[in-house]
Amino acid sequence: MITLGNYLALSGIIFAVGLVGVMTSRNVLKVLLSLELLLAASNLSFVAFSKFNGDYAGQLIVFFVILVAAAEVAIGLAIIVLMYRRLSTIQADDLKVMKW
Amino acid sequence: MVDPQLIWIAFFAPLVACVLITLFFLSSKATSSLIAISGILISFICSCIVFTQIFQNNPPAQLQQSLTWIHIDALTINFGFLMNPLAIMMLLIVTGVGSAIFIYSRGYMDEDPGSPRFFAFLSLFAFSMIGIVLSNNFIQLFIFWELVGLSSYLLIGFWYAKPSAADAGVKAFMVNRLSDFGFLCGIILLWSLSDTGAGRSFQFTELMPVIAHIDPHMLTIVGLLLFCGVVGKSAQIPLHVWLIDAMEGPTPVSALIHAATMVAAGIYLLARTFFIFEPSATALGVIAYTGAITSLMAAILAIAENDIKRILAYSTLSQLGLMVMALGLGGPVQGMYHLTTHAFFKALLFLGAGSVIYALHHEQNIWNMHGLLKKMPVTGITFLIGTLALCGIFPLSGFWSKDGILALAYTHDTMLYLIAATASGFTAFYMGRLFFVAFWPDAPAAHQGDHAHEIHESPAVMTLPLIFLAILAAIGGFIGIPHYLSPQEAPEALNMQVAVISSIVAVLGLGFAFIIYGRRTSADPLASILGSFYAVLQNKFYFDIVYGWYVDNIQQNIALFLSRFEKEFIVRIFVGGVTNLARNGGKTFRYLQNGLVQFYALIFILGAVLLFLILVKTL
């Protein structure tokens, strides 16, 4: 029998993977992918709560999150394309224009 | 039945005039003077009606009306008026003599391009003065007190393009500020002492029953502090220096300030709040001696002065000294009586002097005037009446009022009597000097100037006020002023001994003046008679020089020190410290802004974790 704990554990693992990815990848594309992982992890826990609580509030929020994620990907990819055009690289370390 | 509405109208008519002129008629000479004159005349007429209403009843009515203006916890400040015989007499003087001066100004300031501004200031001045007269509490009185200071500053410095006039205005203002500081301290101290169960108050009528419960030593301090304000406003020694320089203003201003209003405010304050001074013998003694010394000193200084207006200014100082002395001797009635008659004849003398100055095209040195009695008969004769009234010659008004004061001194303090009598002698002498030099018909054509034939009498708009005031100055002793001032008391009988002595002194003074100045001389023979003392007199007993030295060498150094203290210590350490903190803080923390997006993410996540931990802990 799969319990709420199992779902939450999986969600936590995915979230942790995502976090590590966000912080360690130097490739901006990978950072973006890791961000998606974070969102997916939180979606998973929402759905799990929804199922075990027996109401639809959690699932409702997931739709919103997916919506935001889609928008984020669209903008994020556009930024990456522009960045590549301007700097000919997509390494996060090279994005130092905003420095003191 | 006294009609309060009339009093309010009398109160605000000059202010309305001032506002109207300032807003709409600054470019129209004729209209502005008409508005100002009608403003003060409305006040005067209302005061006359109120006067008859008050004295219909016996004892005369007293009326008080006030609105609560500011009310904070235990502090209540009202705005209102307190009408009693003293106030209505003063109001009549201010508006009556004021009206004469306003009308006269229409002639005198005719050629001045700034005359609408002048009339606006005059109206403001009249309003402030009426405010002082009517105020029923100390705070309101203080506000109008300051307004009078302000408007006198504006008027003395009316010809602001002339540096000496601008300086004189500033000097008057500064000296008055100095004294008003003491005055304000006195008001606040009195307020704090006035709590005897029913709460503190600024109102005269509420203070009156409380005074008896206040510690007499504190009351002395209060009295002396309040007297500070009087010293400045009524130009008593040592703060008399501004009054002489105030002669830089237009002559009607000198008449208004020195006769009817500003300088009288101090005396009036003493009389109105006499119940505060009465219990303290020390305060009264200080007041009496200050007045007496001022009186004598100013009278002596006047004999070496050559400017017609300045001589009159010294005589004002001297007479104010007498009034202050009378108050100090416990005689508010005598003091106010002399104030009233003095308002008549001093306004007359100043306006006469103005008429002369007008005719001679702004010549003020008496040695350049001669034989004016013939050329300007109306001015000359009215001036003569004023002179004799001021000297105290029977039966003119000055005789009666001055005698009241001298008799008071005679019965209370011989020393003060001697000082005052000497001052009267000098008064007669310098007024005789002024009159003989400037007006006495002299030997034909000895010193006739080039424009001697052009001199002719001033227009009627100027001579009519002179005649009006001359009549008042002549009959002022017979219209029962002391009775109106204190209706309950029986008028004092004339002290024959004092009257005879002071008449002899006055005649002697005039006689000496005639012996020395009866024949025409080109320079002042007094200079050779007095020798080196004459130089001391011309330097006005070195008051201005000492004050100048004090300001330059002591006050200036303190000010420089404080200025340096402010720049070096307060600005550099406190103000500079705050900016340095911000700048250095910014310098340090900007290294966090390293541009690495993932570093920011790390910080963000650490922060989130921290928050999470705190949350868990508190749960």
Image (cartoon, coloured by chain):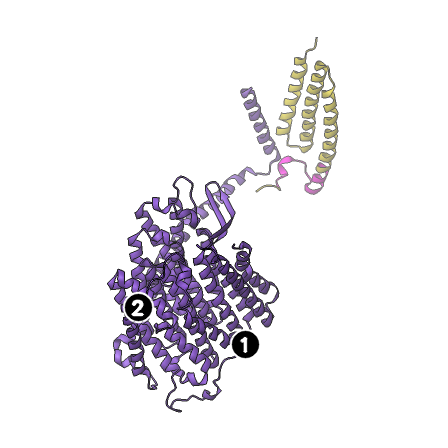
Chain colours: A yellow, B purple
Residue B77 visible? yes
B528 left or right of B92?
left
| Parent chain of label 1 | B
Residue B347 image offset from top left, x and y in percent? 44, 70
Residue with the mark numbered 1? B111
* Magenta-colored stretch includes residue A84: yes
- In the picture as drawn, the residue positioned furthest to the left comes out as B414
Compared to residue B15, the image places residue B438 above or below, namely below
Q: Which residues are magenta?
A: A80-96
Mark 1 residue type: Glu
Q: Decide whether residue B600 is among the magenta residues.
A: no
Picture layout, residue B80 above or below residue B326: above
Task: Please name the amino acid that badge 2 sits on.
Answer: Met
Q: On the rendered structure, is B381 left or right of B16?
A: left
B119 or B66, nearer to the observer: B66
| Side (left or right) of B74 relative to B276 | right
Residue at x-position 52% and y-position 55%: B2
Give the dominant element type of the magenta stretch: helix, strand or loop: helix
- Say whether disc 1 or disc 2 marks the residue closer to the N-terminus: 1
Q: Residue at position x 54%, y 21% from top?
A: B618
> Where residue B420 sits in the image (x, y, percent)?
29, 67
Instruction: Identify residue for label 2.
Output: B297
What is the spatial separation of the Cα atoms under label 1 and label 2, in whole angstroms? Answer: 37 Å
- Pick the quarter of the image with the C terminus of chain B: top right
Q: Residues within 10 Å of mark 1 (few under 14, many from 20)?
A: few
Q: Nearer the viewer, residue B402 or B134?
A: B402
Mark 2 nearby-residue class (10 Å; few <14, some 14–19, many ≥20)? many
Locate residue B434, reporting x and y percent: 36, 78
